[in-house]
Image: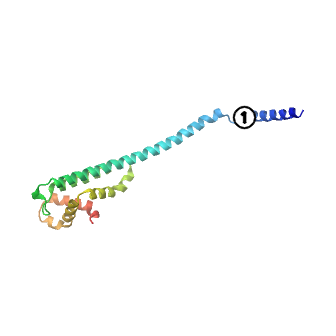
Amino acid sequence: MRTDYKNENQMSLIQCIQTWYQDSIKWIDIVPFLAITISIIALFISVNFSNKNIHLSIQHALMKIVSDKSRDCNRVWNNEPETEKNDNSPHFLLVTELIITTEIVNKSFDLFSKNYRAIRDYEEYYYYIFWKQLTPDIRGWVKRTCNEKGNLENKGNDIYINQINTLSGTFKQYFE
């Protein structure tokens, strides 16, 4: 008789659970909301990851531009004729290449800042990296030339003087 009593209690417990399950929210109602929530979370994670990848791609592209242009400037310096390899030479080709480089880097920052506004915060670092990738001979010549701007004004070449002033404004903070 005792066993019958236990079975009656177990049956009533099972019946209580079934009744509660039927009266409560069913899994079939919860699953779609759970799936939507998981999808939204996955979407936010994906967007965040994509933004980080875009930012890294922009930084990588700028680094490549800076490295390539510094290599070009070093190549121009090394390929100058022997008669031009002195401190009194105006090094027109080098100055032109440096000016072109600063314009390309500035336009690159303008373009990339449309997708990543904070890239402008790193602009001085890229110019510093460019400056350090130039050979010491170029850095020394630019520093001396920019510091002796008064002597250049007597030569009368306004375009060249403007280019030297542009270089001085861009790189003066990196002179050691």
Q: Quadrant of the N terminus?
A: top right
Whether residue 113 can be seen here = no
Residue that badge 1 annotates = 21
Q: Nearer the viewer, residue 160 or 176?
A: 176
| SS for callout 1 | helix
Rendering coords of residue 173 (x, y %): 29, 64
Q: Residues within 10 Å of mark 1 (few under 14, many from 20)?
A: few
Image point (30%, 57%), residue name: 129
Q: Nearer the viewer, residue 91 or 159?
A: 91
Tell me: residue 161, above or below residue 10: below
Image point (24%, 52%), residue name: 71
Tell me: residue 151, above or below residue 45: below
Tell me: residue 12, above or below residue 65: above
Residue that lies at the very extreme toward the left in this rendered image: 83
Count of numbered tags: 1
Whether residue 38 can be seen here = yes
Amino acid type at image mark 1: Tyr
Q: Quadrant of the C terminus?
A: bottom left
Rendering coords of residue 50 (x, y %): 43, 43
Give the image quarter of residue 144. bottom left
